[in-house]
Amino acid sequence: MKKLLFLLFSMLVMIPTIASAHTELTSSNPASGQIVKEDLKEIALTYEGKIESLSTMKLVMDGKDVPLGSVTPKENQLIGTLPAPLENGSYTIQWSIAGEDGHPITGEIPFTVQKEVELEQKTETKEPAVVKKEEPKKENTEQVETNKQTTDSSSSMTTIITVAVVLILMIGLFLLFRRKR
């Protein structure tokens, strides 16, 4: 009986740490809220651990998908290549990965493209003029925080469910062994 209780206690201590070992996003290029002033050739997302080959991302501008040349998971990175330069505007990278533990994780990274646009003046000199767009409004940090809280609450919920299942199993096994005596 002591061995059984030791085994159950060991499982109780170890399972929550295993369940909370999810792969998290550590960095991205472009970063969340970044204002990009030059042409991007690729989008790179870096995670804490290795990601599975089913991981993907898409780029969205004003609710419309922007086609990516390719999306390639490599070790702990998800790399998307851009076939053409991006137009000025607000974009969102929507990513979905499966970590080593198989747990699906999703998120969004908002950023803005604001490149200088050269226009020809219609005067006799025809010298190029530089026109700057207005500074975009500050990115909504509440959306970024909400995405982080959703991921954190998902991890917490998984841990709580795991602990509850282990406790139910422990009580069930205790009652079963007590009944046999």
Image (cartoon, rainbow, N blue to C red):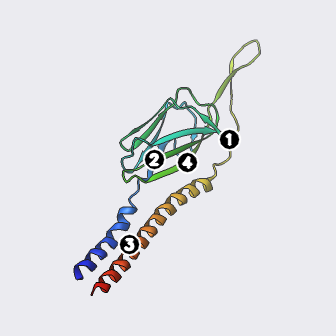
**Along the viewing direction, whichever of 144 and 4 lies nearer the viewer:** 4
Q: Earlier in the sequence, mark 4 or mark 2?
A: 2
Q: Earlier in the sequence, mark 1 or mark 2?
A: 2
Q: Earlier in the sequence, mark 4 or mark 3?
A: 4
Extreme residue in the top direction: 124
Extreme residue in the right direction: 123
Looking at numbered disc 4 in the image, what kind of residue is underneath it?
Glu
The picture places residue 22, in percent across and down from the top left corner, at 41, 56
SS for dot 2: strand
Identify the image quadrant of the C terminus. Answer: bottom left
User: Mark 1 or 4, which is nearer the eye?
Assistant: 4
The picture places residue 112, in percent across and down from the top left corner, at 61, 40
Disc 4 target residue: 108
Disc 2 target residue: 97
Looking at numbered disc 2 in the image, what kind of residue is underneath it?
Ile
Q: CA distance from mark 4 to mark 2?
A: 12 Å
Q: Quadrant of residue 119?
A: top right
Disc 1 target residue: 135
The picture places residue 131, in percent across and down from the top left corner, at 69, 29
Q: Is residue 68 above or below residue 138?
A: above
SS for dot 3: helix
